[in-house]
Amino acid sequence: MKRFSLITILALTAILALGSLASAGIFGDKELENEKLVVTFYNEVKRGGYDVVDTATLKGWVDAKKPMIIVDTMPYEASYKKNHIPGAVQFLFPIPDVTEMKPEDKAKYAKLLGDNKDAVIVVYCGFPKCTRSHNGAMWAKKMGYKNVYRYPGGIKAWMEKDYPIASK
């Protein structure tokens, strides 16, 4: 209940902030598009049952060497191999909602995440509109992991801040 309340407050705050910026003319004609993005994101988080972490907080965790598993859900060749958050492991998720997972894929994901269901898991993809991270975070929660975070800014936000990246 506490998580739902926090998510509700964050989503409403984001919607109000977007509304204020829109009325100030900052977004031009994209108010409805931005509203749709916020509402879609809110619904994904609510449906997935995971938490959210922002770029600055994740960078702080990385710098502090907080024990965690960072999962990059982007394609290996097209994205992960070129740039990823240092220490991240790769597991590809598709963009559409993954309502079912093949047993062998579920077993591979469980092996990647490990046996500690209390481990901090951070899942990201390319950018806020990308839903690969939603799928990865949602499935980690479904598999019983308790401390799951979605990093919606993804590799694009990480790189915009000029934070270090790794490549293979």
Image: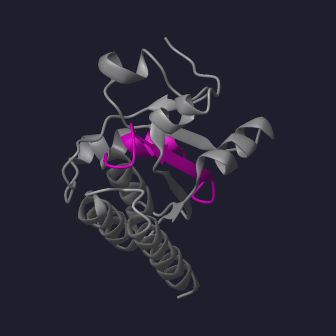
Q: Is 105 positioned to the left or the right of 151 in the image?
A: left
Q: Residue at x 48, y 45 (%)?
A: 153
Is residue 46 positioned above or below 118 on the image? below
Q: Residue at x 59, y 52 (%)?
A: 54
Q: Residue at x 38, y 70 (%)?
A: 42
Q: Residue at x 40, y 67 (%)?
A: 45
Quarter of the image for residue 23 reads bottom left
x%, y% of residue 111?
A: 46, 40
Q: Is 72 positioned to the left or the right of 132 in the image?
A: right
Q: Which of the colour schemes (rainbow, by chain, secondary structure, one colour) is used?
A: one colour
x%, y% of residue 15?
A: 42, 73
Q: Is 94 positioned to the left or the right of 48 in the image?
A: left
Is residue 92 positioned above or below 1 on the image? above
x%, y% of residue 90?
A: 43, 30
x%, y% of residue 33?
A: 25, 59
Q: Is residue 123 magenta?
A: yes
Q: Is residue 25 magenta?
A: no
Q: Nearer the viewer, residue 49 or 41?
A: 41
